[in-house]
Amino acid sequence: MPFRLDMMLVNSPNRPVQSYQRPPCFAARVVTLLLLLALTGCLISGALLTVPVLLGRLVLGFWFGARPVHDIYTLFTGLFTVAVVTKGARSITRQLRTRVQLRNVRWSLWVLVVARTAVASAMVLIWLPFLIGLTFEVTILKPVALLFDQSSIFQIYRCYVFGALIVKILLTICLVAVGENNPWKMALDQVYANGFRNMNLKLIFTAFVWPVSTPLLLYLSLPFFMARTYNMLALWNENPDVNDDKFFTAHTIEGVAHLMFVCSVAAILGLLASFGFCKQLHDQIRDELFLVGKRLVNYDNRATLVVPSTAV
């Protein structure tokens, strides 16, 4: 008859019992463990905040010298620099480990690889974040942070930091939240599979740089051109003898031109979507009333709706 050893030990009156022996200085050991955990947490959190800030100050110091920069920008720049350096070091180490030794590789091939990597890095890691950050500054921060009679001064490092954060968020969404058949994810997987030696600059330009740069440049230039044209016409038609205080001056229109352009495009798209929904609703009602098989019976598009009166 099968039996379980643990049940036998539990039911046995002479089961083995191990007595508890309290180690010496138990309370001191627990307090020391808690203090070490707190100290380790403080050191790790301090390192995670201090090292990126120091690295960000060092990176931004090459561009702006002794000019004071807010620590939030230095923190984001340091975190982004650490992420880029870590990812690049891992990729280069993996590529060098899987490839042949450097002594057997022609130096011209590696010069070409370095050149292509530098061009791709300049386009993807510098140009696109700066362009996206400038778009964010012009669309969101400029109308909100400035008054109507103030002029905006765009700082390069601030645009780049905001753009890098937005690119990081978009990449995370593209890699995690979007499905497998997403063209952006497929292009990223193709670039990752090619590596450094087989890097395809045409693929990077056609899949990432051109689709992102073209609409953003058009968005940045078209409202600015329209606002500047309006500004020139307003100044040309302005009469210096008449003191006409206007709330929406030419300078105001130029300051909120991009936000007005976004709102106009959103309104137009909303109207088109509403028209499409109304047409779809009309077609559904028409099909329910007059559609027999595949033909519309007793349906006149020009006729008006007449409600028949019931006979009493």
Image: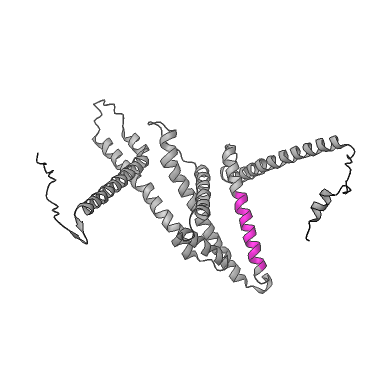
**Quarter of the image where one finds residue 198:** bottom right
Using the image as rendered, state which of residue 70 and residue 244 is in the foreground: 70
Q: Which residues are magenta?
A: 81-97
Pinpoint residue 62: horizontal percent, then vertical percent. 59, 46
Pinpoint residue 255: horizontal percent, then vertical percent. 37, 37
Rendered view: 218 above or below 181: above
Image side of residue 303 versus residue 187, left or right: left
Pinpoint residue 196: horizontal percent, then vertical percent. 57, 65
Image side of residue 62 versus residue 146, left or right: right
Using the image as rendered, state which of residue 283 and residue 228 is in the foreground: 283
The residue that appears at 59% across and 41% down in the rendered structure is 74
Q: Main secondary structure of the magenta part?
A: helix
Q: Is residue 50 magenta?
A: no
Task: Tell me the colour scheme of the image.
Answer: one colour
Q: Is residue 85 magenta?
A: yes
Image side of residue 19 versus residue 42, left or right: right
**Quarter of the image where one finds residue 85:** bottom right
The residue that appears at 81% across and 55% down in the rendered structure is 5
